[in-house]
Image: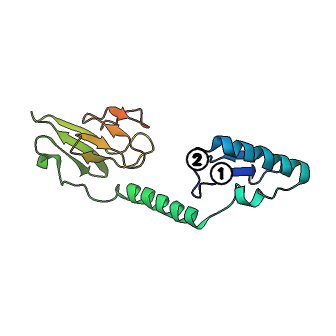
Amino acid sequence: METTDYVGFIGRNPGNERVFVVTGDSGEGMTHGVVAALLIRDVIVNGSSSWQELYEPSRKTTRAIGDYLRENATAIRNFAEYIAPGELDSVEKLGPGEGAIVREGLTKIAAFRDEDGTLYKRSASCTHIGCHVHWNSLERCWDCPCHGSHFAVDGTALNGPAVFPLAGLI
């Protein structure tokens, strides 16, 4: 785990008096391990540490607020795609070797037509957390912008974090 300010979270777990956390090492586990041992010892034995404020697990930074807003805006944008129109009006407009998101009633589908005309239709919802997939014409697969899952034209999960294929259509 990496914190937005690259300073680990070391100290009392927010909301707990006797639970301590050490996380957000950003590749500095050896250094933060020593800091944590000294800081937590001081807090337990003396009631406070001169480093306590710097490593406070509940601290908020200006950058953290900006990152939080950006990340949540990305999620909202991804889920808003479900109410937007499809890229094509119908699967009949798909040419050989093309993939696109098509709206069929209330459902958005990931549609691909191979060179021999076979049409593959799957749900456009990633099986990891439900974000809307996009066609990747270079790699000829469906990509999920939320966490990077990839799916084959037939919906098979190629790369995680998704492990299940895109859902079939009823």
Query: Residue 148: x percent and y percent?
Result: 39, 43
Element under disc 2: loop
Q: Where is residue 44? Give x, y as percent.
A: 87, 48
Question: Which amino acid, mark 1?
Answer: Gly
Left or right of 97 in this view: 104: right
Judged left or right of residue 118, residue 70 is right
Query: Mark 1 — residue?
Result: 8
Corner quadrant of residue 7: bottom right
Task: Give me the C-alpha separation between circle 2 and circle 1.
Answer: 7 Å
Q: Residue furthest bottom?
A: 62
Total numbered labels: 2
Q: Residues within 10 Å of mark 1 (few under 14, many from 20)?
A: many
Q: Earlier in the sequence, mark 2 or mark 1?
A: 1
Proximity of marks 2 and 1: CB atoms separated by less than 8 Å:
yes
Q: Is residue 114 left or right of residue 9?
A: left
Disc 2: which residue = 26
